[in-house]
Image (cartoon, grey):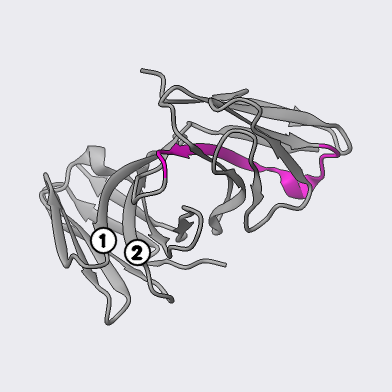
Amino acid sequence: SQQGEEDPQALSIQEGENATMNCSYKTSINNLQWYRQNSGRGLVHLILIRSNEREKHSGRLRVTLDTSKKSSSLLITASRAADTASYFCATDSGGSNYKLTFGKGTLLTVNP
Amino acid sequence: NAGVTQTPKFRVLKTGQSMTLLCAQDMNHEYMYWYRQDPGMGLRLIHYSVGEGTTAKGEVPDGYNVSRLKKQNFLLGLESAAPSQTSVYFCASSAARGNQPQHFGDGTRLSIL
């Protein structure tokens, strides 16, 4: 079963604009991670935010986490054509083994 | 640095045939995973391993078997392929438990006719 659900499913913007993607989940988590997948390639880890953190930055990426609403957002500022990819959130709900549950992803298209 | 390498990259099988997908990682990671990715379904965990000699079932294990005889290798087997197993298969690895990211290979595109 899917834990994280991204919204929107697809997003098209112009180069230079900001892109915001959201992720909602159902159960409590230890951490939430965002991944990027370029067409025909594997997933690449972008950023991890722990359940006791509210915001994290990495370059042009900003991630927020609201555990009371069970939601997270990924903001990409000053987008570039190279940011065109699918973005997935993944949740770690803890337990005895380290497993992630992935959402279905947001397809971001950045038009030059 | 190779990271996670999957072999083969593409394969076409006939229904009922068997095959093994190989995943190798050079990061000395304890944890390894096999996922399948289907349109509109995201990634679903098939099997995983928390160390050499261990395996465990994920979300969609039926029709697949795995083995982790060496720490760096994780094999996914299809004993009798079915059209429903047409998918893109991804292997990933991560360091020992502790909020670590997963590192993915570039996938194996498998078609079952």
Residue that protrudes farthest toward the top in the picture: B1
Q: Is residue A109 left or right of residue B75?
A: left
**Most foreground residue, A97 or B76:** A97
Q: Residues within 10 Å of mark 1 (few under 14, many from 20)?
A: some
| Residue A50, disc | 1
- Give SS at disc 1: strand
Give the residue type that dot 1 points to: Arg
Residue A87 visible in the current orientation: yes
Q: Which residue is mark 2?
A: A30
How packed is label 2: few (under 14 Cα within 10 Å), some, or many (20 or more)? some
Left or right relative to A73: residue B26: right
Magenta span of residues: B79-96
A22 sits to left or right of B35 = left
- The quarter of the image holding the C terminus of chain A is top left
Same chain, labels 1 and 2: yes
Give the chain letter at badge 1: A
Quick check: marks 1 and 2 in contact, CB under 8 Å? Answer: yes
Quote the CA–CA distance across marks 1 and 2. 6 Å
Q: Position of residue B102 (x, y in %)?
A: 40, 42
Label 2 sits on what residue type?
Asn
Residue drawn at (65%, 43%) of the image:
B55
Residue B89 lies in the magenta stretch: yes
Q: Say which label, 1 or 2, has the lower sequence index.
A: 2
Position above or below: A52 against B48: below
Q: Is residue B3 above or below residue B94?
A: above
* Chain under callout 2: A
Query: How many numbered marks appear?
Result: 2
Q: Is residue A39 visible?
A: no
